[in-house]
Image (cartoon, coloured by chain):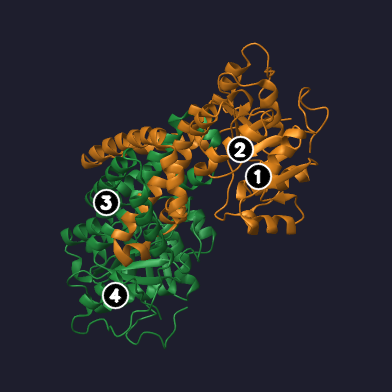
Chain colours: A orange, B green
Amino acid sequence: MCQPDSVPTSDCTTPICVLGLGLIGGSVLRAAVAAGRRAWGYNRSPRVVDDAVGDGFDASTDLVAALRRAESERALVVVAVPMPAVDTVLSAIAEHAPNTTVTDVVSIKAEVAAAVAAHGLSGRFVGGHPMAGTAESGWSAGTADLFRDAVWVVAVDDGTNPDAWLQVADLALDCGAVVVPAESREHDAAVARISHLPHILAEALALSGAAGGDLALGLAAGSFRDGTRVAGTAPALVDAMCEGNGPALLTALDETLDVLNAAREQLAAGSTRELTRAGHEARRRYEQRQRHPIEGVVPGDDGWLTKMRDAGRRGEVWTR
Amino acid sequence: MCQPDSVPTSDCTTPICVLGLGLIGGSVLRAAVAAGRRAWGYNRSPRVVDDAVGDGFDASTDLVAALRRAESERALVVVAVPMPAVDTVLSAIAEHAPNTTVTDVVSIKAEVAAAVAAHGLSGRFVGGHPMAGTAESGWSAGTADLFRDAVWVVAVDDGTNPDAWLQVADLALDCGAVVVPAESREHDAAVARISHLPHILAEALALSGAAGGDLALGLAAGSFRDGTRVAGTAPALVDAMCEGNGPALLTALDETLDVLNAAREQLAAGSTRELTRAGHEARRRYEQRQRHPIEGVVPGDDGWLTKMRDAGRRGEVWTR
């Protein structure tokens, strides 16, 4: 819940206008209402809107009306449509809600920031990415606590307006998440490693198992099951993630090909020692990671963006 | 439990002599006793033997005595020592238990079969590999139900003695497992794909995440957690598995490098469609695999080894 004694400059009564009511947008709408915010949503599908209204939420298929209301109530506009629809929605925001603060929940950040710049909205935009999801999608899969204890990246790109940043961070905190500040390009490089590359490797591992036929698949136990789990994700969703983050994923994949080629040569020479020591140490580092709170940084103070980026790189989080 | 009305030619009163009382050997000893078998174990460590005796089992540090008893009681000898100790144990078997049937539970089969041949024991040896384990190791980690519903590969190499095969299969069934028949080399090729390659890819993925620093590790969620889980295994254990199955793992790794290099080129051209469709289909095939029972094959009948291999390749299992 929004707490008046939390961040001094936060504006916890800011209403929320959510554009797109799929899994993430629908969960943001629910969580914002649960946190006591005034909130309404738009979706282009009447069926989705009917479901949301049927569940007691304020939703409509009228994008212009939703945005005009956002403009008049000084709402925070949350872009929660898939990447291919972002451009259309940004055009409507530029036209119908020219003074609102805008954020998004798309899983890649540099491409969205570029689209925002192309629409001249950069001055009042702060990118976001809640790192949460389920195997399901759509309004019905959403919940008010989807973001509970999740990480929500809030971008700290050059020129970020500190008041807008705090509005977006407050929404994330109201949704139960912790906030990690990161530049859009650093975010994209990081998620290529820990979110998109895992899908590529899982697909490749699944193919190797199936190439061994029913004998190999019949012998498969925990290591194969866990290593291929995300190959069960709908291919179109994986394509959207991976293709949308192509350059960063290519960098991560090339690094991994180098690692695997070196391991291949060492295995041919009879040893996997170097890979297994390094990989085990890396996994331990992951297991031992901690979320220390960011301290001593005040959005708007001199050098706050640099300090936020450094804190994010240390794995620190912005909390109440 | 051993059931007299099960497989007609099985010999369910055969005692069991387990050499090596780690996780797998210790669990075989417990499971055999739980199934009503006479069973005793050997371990070179007095501490392990004390623990086993303290838990009510018949165990000793005297390898020669354990084997002489196996010879006089016509026991099935189970080699459950790590690969580097297999040679020493086979020498002792050849000397002190020259008429017993012998099996093993080592996770690679061709190398063990070659060592068995070098000791002139092939005529009474049937290789085995129970596909079970935990993150823990040692006597104390074992349980009588470790193999419950697990797959236990029992080798069907050229020249396999059908009575010996049934003795080993009966032990596996008494331990609660289902039996998959496979040639040693086919087994090794299959486990390279579904057990050893997953470790190599998990190590590489862990390294990619750690290379992204605390920011990337802090953003990591389910796909990274599951994809790197087995990188948490002790490196020496992973080395022993992977290095022991070097040629087969090299084949699987080279295939996977081809898949990843092709995916890299397609990603550079803007698409991951081909990989994600194929990988998703492979994972579905894994999820939908079924364990149909082997029917119409009688060990010892004409062509039984070929029929067993074909059944194993279809993912079929030998049950009671």
- Of the residues tagged 1 and 3, which is closer to the observer? 1
Badge 4: residue crowd in 10 Å (few <14, some 14–19, many ≥20): many
Determine contact: label 1, label 3, CB under 8 Å: no
Residue name at image x 66 percent, y 51 percent: A61
Q: Residues within 10 Å of mark 2 (few under 14, many from 20)?
A: some
Residue under pointer 2:
A92
Q: Amino acid at mark 2?
A: Ala
Question: In the image, what residue type sits under mark 4?
Answer: Ala
Answer with left or right where residue A10 lies relative to residue B150.
right
Of labels 2 and 1, earlier in sequence is: 1
Element type where label 2 sits in the image: helix
B200 to the left or right of A315: left
In the displayed structure, would residue B250 be above or below residue B304?
A: above
Q: Label 2 marks which chain's residue?
A: A
Mark 1: which secondary structure?
A: helix
Q: CA distance from mark 2 to mark 1?
A: 8 Å
Q: Which residue is mark 1?
A: A63
Give neighbour class at mark 3: few <14, some 14-19, many 20+ (Cα, 10 Å).
many
Q: CA distance from mark 1 to mark 3?
A: 52 Å
Query: Mark 4 or mark 3, which has the lower sequence index?
Result: 3
Name the residue tied to disc 4. Answer: B311
Tell me whether marks 3 and 2 sit on the same chain: no
Q: Residue at x 33, y 34 (%)?
A: A254
Dot 2 and dot 1 residues touching (CB under 8 Å)? yes
Instruction: Work out which quarter of the rendered image holds the C terminus of chain B and state it.
Output: bottom left
| Number of callouts | 4
* Disc sitting over residue B252 in the figure: 3
Give the farthest residue toward the top. A302
Label 1 marks which chain's residue? A
